[in-house]
Amino acid sequence: MHLMYFTEQPMSAYPEAEGRDFGATALMFSNRHFDPAAGSRLYNEYLDHYRLAENVGFDGIMLNEHHNAPFCMQAKCNVFASILAATTRRVKIVLLGNPLPLTDNPVRLAEELAMIDMVSGGRLVSGFVRGGGQEQLATGVNPAYNRERFEEAHDLIVRAWTQPGPFRWEGTHYQHRVVNPWAVPLQKPHPRVWIPGVLSKETIIWAAKKRYPYIALSTAIDATKKIWELYDQVANEAGYAGGPEYRGYLQRCHIAETEEKALENARQFMWMQGEFTGLAHPVWSTPSGYFSPSIRTQFVEYAVGRRSNPRGSSFEDQIKSQMIVAGTPKTVIPKLRRLLEETRPSIVGFWAADGFVSSADTRTCIRLLGEEVLPALREIGKELGLWSPFEANAPVSMNFPDSAAPAVERAASRQPVEVS
Amino acid sequence: MSTSTPDWTTETIPIAGVGMQLTRAGDGPPLLILHHDIGTLPRLPFYDELARRFTVLVPSHLGYDGSQRPEWMRNVRDLAAAHQWLLSELPITRAAQTVSIVGLGFGGWVAAEMATQAPRAFRKLVLVGAMGIKPDRAVIADQALVSYIDYVRMGFSDQAAFDRLFGADPETSRLEHWDLNREMSFRIAWKPYMYNASLPHLLGGVATPTLVVWGRDDRIVPLECGERYAKTLPRARLEIVEGAGHFVEMEKPSELAKLVTNFVSQGDA
């Protein structure tokens, strides 16, 4: 199994009432409510949590990014990835991921990722995402071409990583006279690419065709099973068998010394579930052309307030469906066993806390996960045969079927930078 | 002027690899009407009134109002060229200096682009609340930030007019229709939003006599854009319609039809 630590990097230090009065805490909720002093403190707390996660035994640290919203302070996952590349020594740095459509220069992105891969000694997993609906607006990128840009930027980046330059790129959205970045990744043929997602069938199908692991982001168990049915079907058609090494799952999971404390803190997952519920703005989160045409009716109704967010559900429902798991290690392990037995992922991210959960409680959660939960899960993983892409030596992609695990060319003998 | 209801027919004409829907009625000189970014209702009193004097041609912009999407189309000049193509397909519009164009809002931008592409081709030009020029003092209202209903309501001075046309709470099928049109507008006019920075530099070459019409209460395209069109086009004047917003043809159909008829008919034998 590959077990990762994750936080959305919530920015809870803003006046809540202002958010409620404005009616949305996204896109146009003014950044005058952002407090850089609190931001400085929080960024450093999050770095501290990441280092603790490595120390207590996590295999990976999962990073993401969002824009113009307090639910996630991380505006560029490559920045934190760069810091972690130099300040950790063992964990995989798993980016889930860079929002490709938002970039106007995929070659620059390919260079940045290559640098992170080299600095970390080949520990990069480079996931890619489409970016949320409102982020198309936040960055001025056309939502109607979101998927076109995603696919083209991906193709260009992988080519920049794997084909010696110089070459020319004349695409629909990207044109480059010269593609010849000096920096290329340490891992060969290229760093692993994992694709996270919530809802869009198109993304699941695309990932399965590429033979990239798909990471289901906190879907309910039944919905997750449907994802794997689709993934496995596409995999079969593509000529390989799906299975645990292609399956990832992000689990909201808060652990405390007592049940009461865990449940109380877990409620903070409702603080703001990203743009997906709560104070999301129905128009900004679903710009025309961004969502799947197959669910146009649902989204236009959502946009004018005729139906609740097709992606949302209540805290109680999420506890019941295990979209949120909370408790002590003793009560949480059986629930996680159920997740593993029923959906058979080999990659599991633990989204440990959100909202106003204190740094001390977050640290307790990380410690209990590392000391008690992860060892138990590794045993269950062995019992169930949940081998991660690294353990299974799965090919990096359809294009490199014989690649097995990416070889680190020359694993640099290096020490992490000490940070006090 | 006849008061009978015109007989409207719709056909699909192959243009640039897709089908362009064309609705037409009446006889007399050809009058091309280019619709808004929100599309158009299939029938409007404004169209009926004009069809009593003109051969009224109401094409759907490619990709709008349920017509086939031209996947390749990426800007408004492409759309203008597609309408030029349409005019060269129809026997009644082939000859130069025969067609007049009425461009409504977004369609006004398309009409202005057509006029710069063919500065001597058209008989008369009427631009109503036309997009296409960047305002200096305000911005063109951005539909990306508001709901389908709020955007269309913004275009009416009198909300009762909206209610009469679309119902106080429009049906979901109407919203889906607006969403498809909005997506198409994003595909071709996302950035810069609803203007072409080079257009004002090219308007000076347009020889076509032009009437610029603006609703006094247009909250979508600022009146200053109308003033700019009237000033930049060599043979243009500005008419302001009181009590109308952006959708002048839906709020003040008779008044606008009269303005169009008088202006387009001027100089007729």
Image (tube, rainbow, N blue to C red):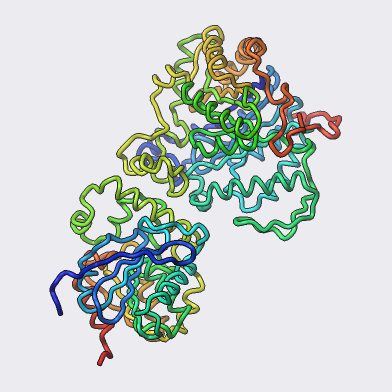
Quadrant that contains the N terminus of chain B: bottom left
Instruction: Return the x and y of residue B39 as percentages of the image width and height.
Output: 34, 60
In the image shown, does B8 or B237 lie closer to the viewer?
A: B8
Residue B43 left/right relative to B21: left
In the image shown, does A271 or A329 lie closer to the viewer?
A: A329
Instruction: Return the x and y of residue A31 as percentages of the image width and height.
Output: 48, 44
Q: In the rendered image of this protein, does residue B245 appear above or below residue B257? A: above
The furthest residue to the left: B3
Q: Is residue A96 visible?
A: no
Residue at point 45% right, 11% down? Answer: A260
Residue at point 34% right, 48% down? Answer: B176
Q: In the rendered image of this protein, does residue B208 appear above or below residue A362? A: below
Q: Quarter of the image holding residue A406?
A: top right
Q: Quarter of the image holding residue A247?
A: top right
Q: In the rendered image of this protein, does residue A104 appear above or below residue A369? A: below
Q: How many labels were placed on the picture?
A: 0
Instruction: Return the x and y of residue A251 as percentages of the image width and height.
Output: 54, 22
Residue A295 left/right relative to A69: left
Quadrant that contains the C terminus of chain B: bottom left
In the image shown, does A257 or B92 lie closer to the viewer?
A: B92
Q: Is residue B62 visible?
A: yes
The furthest residue to the bottom: B269
Residue at point 84% right, 34% down? Answer: A409
Instruction: Return the x and y of residue B245 as percentages of the image width and height.
Output: 27, 64
In the image shown, does A196 or B9 lie closer to the viewer?
A: B9
Residue A144 left/right relative to A192: left
